[in-house]
Structures are given as C-alpha cells and as structure tokens.
Image (tube, coloured by chain):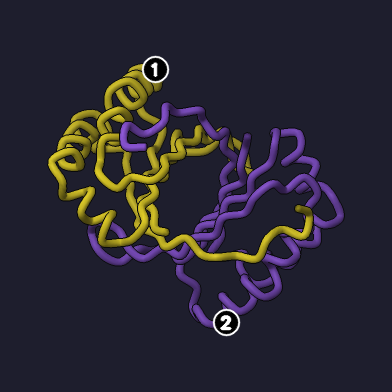
Chain colours: A yellow, B purple
Amino acid sequence: MVKLVALYKKPANVQDFDDQYFNTHLPLANKMPGLRKVEVARITGTPAGESEYHLMAELYFDSKEDMQAAMSSPEGRASTKNLMSFAKDVSFFMFADVEKVPASANT
Amino acid sequence: MVKLVALYKKPANVQDFDDQYFNTHLPLANKMPGLRKVEVARITGTPAGESEYHLMAELYFDSKEDMQAAMSSPEGRASTKNLMSFAKDVSFFMFADVEKVPASANT
C-alpha cells in the first residue's frame, strides 16, 4: 500500500481554509479512482508547543501506479486544481510506501 | 483517536539508521501502554522529485491523555531515550487529532 501525504501549514484564515478544505476539496479528492482510504488529522501541537502545521491528510492507494493514475485522472486533476486555488502557499506533499511492521506487543 | 506523528529527515547513513530504527527503536516504542496502532511509511519522493524526508511514523492512541501517559511511562521514556541516541538531529514530532471524514465516494 502507498499513500500521498499532504501537510498544510497554518493558513491565514483557519475557518475559511477549513470550510474550503472539508466542504469542497475533500469531496472532490474522494472521487479519485482507486482511492482506498483517506485520513485527515488536525495538528494540535508539538512537544515544544505550537505547531506551524494545521492539517495532515493521507490518501491511500493499492500501488504507486494506482496513485499516479488517480492523480492524472480527470477527478485527480480537478481535485488538485481546486486545492491550488486556496492552499497553494501552505501545502506540501510527499509520496510514501507503507511498511509492514510487527504487531504491537500490547495487542 | 489521536496520534503522534514522527517525521525523520534523510539520515547520513540510511542503512545504519534503518537498522537502529526498525530493529531496536520500534520494538521499544511498541511496548508503550495504550498504543493502539503503529504505521511506518518510507518516503519515496515528492511531486517535485526527491524528498528531504526518509520515514514517517504514526503512533495511535485512544485519547490525548493516553498518549501523554504513554510518553511519560517508563516504556515511553526508554523509547524516547533510545530514539534520541541516534535520531535526535533528523527527527520532528507533531501531535494530531484524527478527524472523522465522510467515506469515499468510491467504496
């Protein structure tokens, strides 16, 4: 499994950003073909105090090929275009391979 | 649900870092009380090319209180101490609340 990780720095207007992100962008992103799972998390801080980051989103796909196809699809391009209209200056993306790690000793 | 997100920049010696991370650190981190899930991902790149980041780890807990208790526990302190012995200069941490997001339109 692979994922697209999007990190968003604190926007100038958090309420406006959240409205555009959750009500417009996320529904568009969810239309991408091959998307298996989405996890969005609100950054609440760091061990040192406040974080410069606001949100982190992870979009999961079965393979790197599926992720690339999703981003190149009409739905992916519409989603990216929308995102760039309000989050261009605060967003940062990474591609990642999810590793198989041993199960927790606690579970 | 909350998570501790750890981002690691590319270390000077990737093979040595991975050996210490996967074979020593992760088993120690897995001993933390209240830890519900761990996801480790290998950063493979960015839309612009190579990433400055190497790994991302996410440690999930039921609540902020559980996460704080885990980090303050003897197991949490042993895990942090170990991590700082080899990853101090490349690591970066964030706390986050996992948001409830609508299910994908595709599933």
Residue A97 in the image: x percent, y percent?
42, 63
Question: Is residue A106 found left or right of B21 in the rendered image?
Answer: right
Parent chain of label 2: B
Residue B61 placement (x, y as % from top left): 68, 41
- Give the x, y percent position of residue A55: 44, 35
Three-letter code for the amino acid on which mark 2 is drawn = Asp
- Which quarter shows the N terminus of chain A? bottom left
- What is the number of the mark on residue A45? none
Toward the left, the furthest residue is A74
Q: What crowding class fits label 1: few (fewer than 14 Cα within 10 Å), some (14-19), or many (20 or more)?
A: few
Mark 2: secondary structure: helix
Q: Is residue B72 left or right of residue A45?
A: right
Give the residue drawn at x 80%, y 62%.
Answer: B78
Q: Chain of mark 1?
A: A
The type of residue carrying mark 1 is Gln
Evaluate whether residue B101 shows in this view: yes
- Residue displayed at 37% across by 56% down: A62
- Which residue position holds label 2? B16
Number of residue marks: 2
Q: Is residue A53 visible?
A: no
The quadrant where residue A89 appears: top left
Is A47 displayed left or right of A69 in the figure? right
Q: Residue at x 26, y 61 (%)?
A: A65
The local secondary structure at tag 1 comes to helix
Q: Relative to the observer, which residue lies in front, A52 or B37?
A: B37
Residue B22, position as x, y percentages in the image: 62, 72
Q: Is residue A30 above or below residue B85?
A: above
Q: Give the image quarter of residue B68.
A: top right
Residue at image mark 1: A15
